Amino acid sequence: MPSVDTPETPTPGLPRISVVIPCYNEEATVLELLGRVRATPVEIHEIIAVDDGSSDQTAALLESADIPGLHVLRHDHNQGKGAALRTAFAAVSGDIVIIQDADLEYDPAEYPGLIDPILKNRADVVFGSRFMGGGPHRVVYFWHMVANRLITLASNMLTNLNLTDVETCYKVFRSDILAQITVEENRFGFEPEITAKVAKLNPRIFEVGISYYGRTYEEGKKIGWRDGFRAIYAILKYNLFR
């Protein structure tokens, strides 16, 4: 059974912020990441962490974490990022939902800028873009950057959006928009899938420049070339056949 702490009482008049965190074998970073989420200047209503069948100590660390508002859910075997987010989305109770990876590639200090267009009633969905400025960027893999840009281009051609970073972790939603979407992809095909489904709802979409502290495969990076092919499949499937 998941351990559930009571969410903090939100300040009257402010929207409740839910942070959802898919976790798989992130024992080296997950506690620091949770601390950073709690330290962000944004008032957090709840954190929903889904352990996706980790084979290391991630699940144990989550269960033992003394973090206000933390909900821990578990999969008995690894299913993928999309599956973990599907589980998390079903449990959210906030008004705004932020997707946060469990590694340290994305900094929760970015939350104020990410939610600002929604708070000002200018946006319903916000993408945090690694390719439109923002803060510092670690220099890592050239071909990953090329693949990201090609996937974003292919997605934009079918959604008629002008996004710069479809594959970004940081996607922020008004919960009433998210409630209209059913996630089907289990792995990283989630990114182009949800972009296609968001586009079909025709909400107000903004992008915000973010920093990026990418990691190497030796440091635990998981996405690979097979996921790139799946992303193209997902772009075609969810834009043309759904």
Image (tube, rainbow, N blue to C red):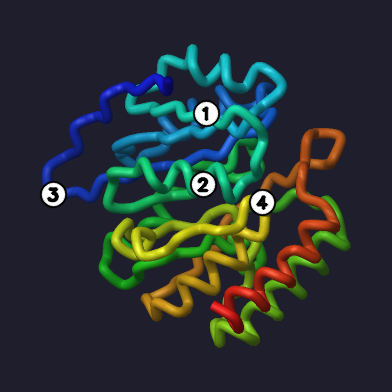
Quickly name the residue at label 2.
85
Residue type at the position of mark 3: Gly
Label 4 vs label 3: CA separation?
Answer: 36 Å
**Disc with the residue nearer the chain's start (1 vs 3):** 3
**Do callouts 2 and 1 mark residues in contact (Cβ within 8 Å)?**
no
| Distance (Cα) linking label 1 and label 3 | 33 Å
Mark 2 Cα shell of 10 Å, populated few (<14), some (14-19), many (≥20): many
Where is residue 67 shown, x and y percent of the image?
40, 21
Picture coordinates of residue 223 (x, y %)? 77, 49
Q: How many marks?
A: 4
Query: Alpha carbon of mark 4 to alpha carbon of mark 1: how far?
Result: 16 Å
- Residue under pointer 4: 187
Q: Report how far apart the C-alphas of labels 4 and 2 lie in the structure.
A: 10 Å
Image depth: mark 2 or mark 3 in front: 2
- Residue at 53 percent of width and 65 percent of height: 194
Q: Quadrant of residue 238?
A: bottom right
Q: CA distance from mark 2 to mark 1?
A: 11 Å
Q: Is residue 5 left or right of residue 227?
A: left
For the N terminus, the quadrant is top left
Kindly identify which numbered label has been placed on residue 74: 1
Q: Secondary structure at mark 4?
A: loop
Q: Which residue is mark 3?
A: 13
Considering the numbered disc 2 on the image, is that residue within a helix, a strand or a loop?
helix
* Residue 53 quadrant: top right
At x 46%, y 71%, the residue is 198
Q: Quadrant of residue 125?
A: bottom left
**Element at badge 3?**
loop
- Marks 4,1: beta carbons within 8 A: no
